[in-house]
């Protein structure tokens, strides 16, 4: 079993990719429409998608005539993104970088962190650093959008075991909730073509009130959230959080 602290390096590159397809392209279309509507994005606006994966959202945003910069640490995902972009004849700028280290300043109208991509780092300062980097990257008036699992739902529906199949890969999870640190600690095992890879991963999970407090501390204003892309209110029955905040100042 791999125990390295930086579990996300091999986990995404080697084993997780088929499971990113569990969300259908149709679901993504609805999510992208929601993102554009909620953030009031107009053609030509600049969007930072960080981390972007294989471009699930970056590409449809670029097809909607937004100027997209897509950041991820997994090289093969960025290569796949560029292949899809060239097939669809759209341009997306890709940056191979750790999300704690992106150094854009006052450049984007919107910054996205989607698909439960916050909370990977064991040291909470690193998780907050991701949000600080996104704040820094936004123009005054620009908006952040976070989409992540709702801790209140997770606690109400906690299952200590789970499995899913994607293509010819199977993933099996054995979970323990660490209440002291609000972390879901998971022994995550992938089975494919007779071989097995196992990881010890841990994900910090957040409640709505906590995200309001964290985003406020970073400097965001006008923070709001919904529990779905139908704008339903957040409560413990909603699996997802969609959170928006604005960087103060004129513009966007
Ligand atoms: C759950 S996926 C979500 C991808 C995308 N936002 C989406 O919704 O499809 C998480 C992504 O985070 C990337 N990632 C993991 N650790 C990272 C890091 N330290 N810096 C940048 N990207 C990272 C992975 O490569 C993966 O693409």
Image (cartoon, helix red, strand yellow):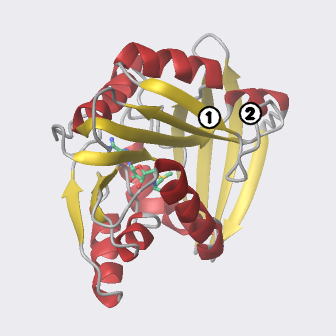
Q: Is residue 207 visible?
A: no
Q: Can residue 139 be spotted in the picture?
A: yes
Residue 225 badge: 1
Report whether 121 appears left or right of 176: left
Residue 175: where, in percent of width, then height?
70, 35
In three-dimensional space, the C-alpha distance between marks 1 and 2, rounded to whole angstroms, equals 7 Å
User: Residue at 51% across / 44% down in the picture?
Assistant: 199
Residue that protrudes farthest toward the front in the picture: 250
CA neighbours of label 2 inside 10 A, class few (<14), some (14 to 19), many (20+): many
- Residue 198, above or below 29: above
Who is closer to the viewer here, 56 or 63?
A: 63
In what element is the residue under mark 1?
A: strand
Q: Nearer the viewer, residue 149 or 209?
A: 209
- Horizontal and vertical percent for residue 229? 67, 53
Mark 1 Cα within 10 Å, few/some/many (few <14, many 20+)?
many
Quarter residue 252 falls in: top left
Residue ID at (36%, 37%): 6
Counting the numbered discs, the total is 2
Q: Residue at x 58, y 57 (%)?
A: 34
Q: Upstream in the sequence, badge 1 or badge 2?
A: 1
Instruction: Give the labeled residue for mark 2.
Output: 234
Cβ atoms at labels 1 and 2 below 8 Å apart: yes
Q: Is residue 66 above or below residue 83?
A: above
At x 41%, y 67%, the residue is 61
Residue 24 position, x and y percent, is: 64, 72
């Amino acid at each position: 079993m791999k125990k390295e602290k930086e579990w996300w390096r091999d986990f995404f590159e080697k084993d997780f990719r088929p499971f990113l397809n569990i969300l259908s392209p149709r679901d993504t279309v609805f999510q992208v429409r929601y993102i554009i509507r909620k953030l009031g994005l107009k053609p030509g606006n600049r969007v930072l998608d960080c981390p972007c994966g294989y471009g699930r959202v970056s590409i449809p945003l670029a097809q909607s005539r937004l100027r997209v910069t897509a950041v991820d640490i997994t090289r093969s995902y960025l290569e796949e993104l560029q292949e899809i972009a060239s097939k669809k004849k759209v341009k997306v700028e890709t940056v191979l970088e750790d999300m704690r280290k992106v150094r854009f300043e006052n450049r984007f109208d919107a910054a996205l962190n989607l698909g439960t991509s916050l909370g990977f780092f064991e040291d909470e300062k690193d998780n907050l650093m991701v949000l600080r980097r996104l704040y820094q990257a936004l123009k005054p008036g620009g908006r952040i959008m976070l989409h992540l699992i709702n801790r209140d739902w997770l606690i109400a529906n906690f299952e200590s075991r789970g499995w899913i199949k994607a293509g010819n890969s199977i993933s099996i999870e054995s979970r323990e909730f660490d209440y002291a640190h609000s972390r879901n600690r998971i022994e995550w095992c992938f089975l494919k073509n007779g071989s097995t890879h196992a990881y010890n991963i841990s994900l910090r999970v957040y409640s709505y009130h906590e995200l309001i407090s964290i985003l406020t501390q970073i400097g965001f204003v006008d923070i709001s959230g919904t529990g779905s892309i139908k704008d339903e209110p957040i409560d413990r029955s909603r699996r997802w959080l969609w959170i928006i905040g604005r960087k103060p100042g004129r513009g966007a």
